[in-house]
Amino acid sequence: MKTEDRKQAIAGYKKRASVAGVFAVRCRATGEVWVGQALDLDKIQNRIWFTLRMGSHRIAELQRAWSAHGADNLSFETLERIEDEELAYVRDTQLKERVHYWRTQLNAAAV
Protein backbone atom coordinates (compact mmCIF):
# COMPACT_ATOMS: atom_id res chain seq x y z
CA MET A 1 0.00 0.00 0.00
CA LYS A 2 1.34 3.40 -0.93
CA THR A 3 2.02 5.89 1.84
CA GLU A 4 -0.60 8.33 0.56
CA ASP A 5 -3.24 5.59 0.31
CA ARG A 6 -2.42 4.47 3.83
CA LYS A 7 -2.75 8.03 5.17
CA GLN A 8 -6.14 8.41 3.48
CA ALA A 9 -7.34 5.10 4.90
CA ILE A 10 -6.30 6.12 8.42
CA ALA A 11 -7.95 9.52 8.05
CA GLY A 12 -11.16 7.88 6.84
CA TYR A 13 -11.16 5.51 9.80
CA LYS A 14 -10.71 8.37 12.26
CA LYS A 15 -13.54 10.38 10.67
CA ARG A 16 -16.10 7.59 10.82
CA ALA A 17 -19.02 8.30 13.11
CA SER A 18 -19.42 6.21 16.22
CA VAL A 19 -22.87 5.23 17.43
CA ALA A 20 -23.61 5.31 21.14
CA GLY A 21 -26.18 3.05 22.72
CA VAL A 22 -27.27 0.37 25.14
CA PHE A 23 -26.31 -3.30 24.84
CA ALA A 24 -26.90 -6.60 26.62
CA VAL A 25 -24.73 -9.64 27.22
CA ARG A 26 -26.75 -12.80 27.82
CA CYS A 27 -25.72 -16.19 29.16
CA ARG A 28 -27.85 -18.89 27.53
CA ALA A 29 -26.88 -21.50 30.11
CA THR A 30 -27.94 -19.54 33.20
CA GLY A 31 -30.33 -16.94 31.81
CA GLU A 32 -28.31 -14.12 33.36
CA VAL A 33 -28.31 -10.76 31.59
CA TRP A 34 -25.93 -7.82 31.92
CA VAL A 35 -26.81 -4.41 30.44
CA GLY A 36 -24.38 -1.59 29.74
CA GLN A 37 -23.81 1.51 27.69
CA ALA A 38 -21.13 2.39 25.18
CA LEU A 39 -20.11 5.45 23.22
CA ASP A 40 -19.18 3.19 20.31
CA LEU A 41 -21.37 0.09 19.94
CA ASP A 42 -19.22 -1.22 17.10
CA LYS A 43 -16.22 -1.68 19.41
CA ILE A 44 -17.66 -2.65 22.80
CA GLN A 45 -18.23 -6.36 22.14
CA ASN A 46 -14.63 -6.85 21.07
CA ARG A 47 -13.45 -5.04 24.21
CA ILE A 48 -15.66 -7.15 26.51
CA TRP A 49 -14.77 -10.45 24.83
CA PHE A 50 -11.06 -9.58 25.01
CA THR A 51 -11.16 -8.94 28.77
CA LEU A 52 -13.18 -12.12 29.29
CA ARG A 53 -10.66 -14.20 27.29
CA MET A 54 -7.86 -12.70 29.38
CA GLY A 55 -9.75 -13.54 32.59
CA SER A 56 -9.69 -9.93 33.71
CA HIS A 57 -13.23 -8.60 33.31
CA ARG A 58 -14.22 -6.28 36.14
CA ILE A 59 -17.68 -7.87 36.58
CA ALA A 60 -16.93 -11.08 38.50
CA GLU A 61 -20.30 -12.73 37.72
CA LEU A 62 -19.84 -12.21 33.99
CA GLN A 63 -16.30 -13.58 34.16
CA ARG A 64 -17.56 -16.63 36.07
CA ALA A 65 -20.27 -17.25 33.45
CA TRP A 66 -17.66 -17.02 30.68
CA SER A 67 -15.28 -19.36 32.48
CA ALA A 68 -17.97 -21.90 33.36
CA HIS A 69 -19.96 -21.97 30.12
CA GLY A 70 -17.62 -20.60 27.45
CA ALA A 71 -17.94 -18.07 24.67
CA ASP A 72 -20.55 -20.12 22.80
CA ASN A 73 -23.07 -19.60 25.60
CA LEU A 74 -22.68 -15.82 25.77
CA SER A 75 -24.28 -13.52 23.26
CA PHE A 76 -24.09 -9.79 22.61
CA GLU A 77 -27.03 -7.74 21.39
CA THR A 78 -27.65 -4.07 20.76
CA LEU A 79 -30.77 -3.00 22.61
CA GLU A 80 -30.95 0.62 21.56
CA ARG A 81 -28.99 3.15 19.55
CA ILE A 82 -28.80 6.81 20.56
CA GLU A 83 -29.19 9.13 17.61
CA ASP A 84 -26.39 11.55 16.84
CA GLU A 85 -26.21 14.07 19.63
CA GLU A 86 -23.67 16.85 19.40
CA LEU A 87 -23.91 17.78 23.07
CA ALA A 88 -22.09 15.19 25.15
CA TYR A 89 -24.04 15.86 28.34
CA VAL A 90 -27.37 15.33 26.56
CA ARG A 91 -26.11 12.06 25.08
CA ASP A 92 -24.77 10.92 28.45
CA THR A 93 -28.07 11.72 30.17
CA GLN A 94 -30.00 9.79 27.52
CA LEU A 95 -27.66 6.80 27.90
CA LYS A 96 -28.08 6.74 31.69
CA GLU A 97 -31.88 6.89 31.41
CA ARG A 98 -32.05 4.15 28.79
CA VAL A 99 -29.64 1.86 30.65
CA HIS A 100 -31.76 2.19 33.78
CA TYR A 101 -34.89 1.40 31.73
CA TRP A 102 -33.37 -1.73 30.15
CA ARG A 103 -31.88 -3.01 33.41
CA THR A 104 -35.31 -2.72 34.99
CA GLN A 105 -37.08 -4.36 32.03
CA LEU A 106 -34.66 -7.29 31.79
CA ASN A 107 -33.93 -7.60 35.51
CA ALA A 108 -30.28 -7.28 34.52
CA ALA A 109 -27.02 -6.46 36.26
CA ALA A 110 -24.53 -3.81 35.18
CA VAL A 111 -21.73 -4.63 32.79
Image: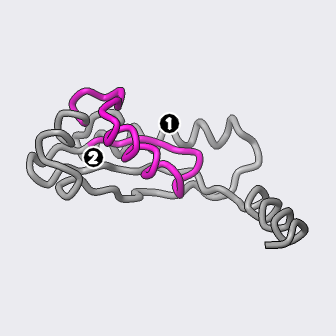
Q: Which mark sits nearer the N-terminus, 2 or 1?
A: 1
Residue 8 marker = none
Q: Which residue is mark 2?
A: 105
x and y percentages locating residue 95 in the rendered image: 53, 42
Q: Residue most toward the right?
A: 4
x and y percentages locating residue 38 in the rendered image: 52, 44
Magenta stretch?
Answer: 34-62
Amino acid type, mark 2? Gln
Quadrant location, the N terminus: bottom right
Quadrant location, the C terminus: top left
x and y percentages locating residue 64 in the rendered image: 18, 33
Compare residues 46 and 87 and report the one nearer the observer: 46
Q: Is 38 a magenta residue?
A: yes
x and y percentages locating residue 66 in the rendered image: 21, 42
Place residue 67 in its image quadrant.
top left
Above or below: residue 94 compared with residue 58: below
Compare residues 47 and 54 and report the one nearer the observer: 54
Q: Which residue is mark 1?
A: 96
Q: Secondary structure at mark 2?
A: helix
Q: Is 110 a magenta residue?
A: no
Q: How many marks?
A: 2
Q: Secondary structure at mark 1?
A: helix
Rendered residue at 90%/68% (across/down): 4
Rendered residue at 29%/41% (across/down): 34
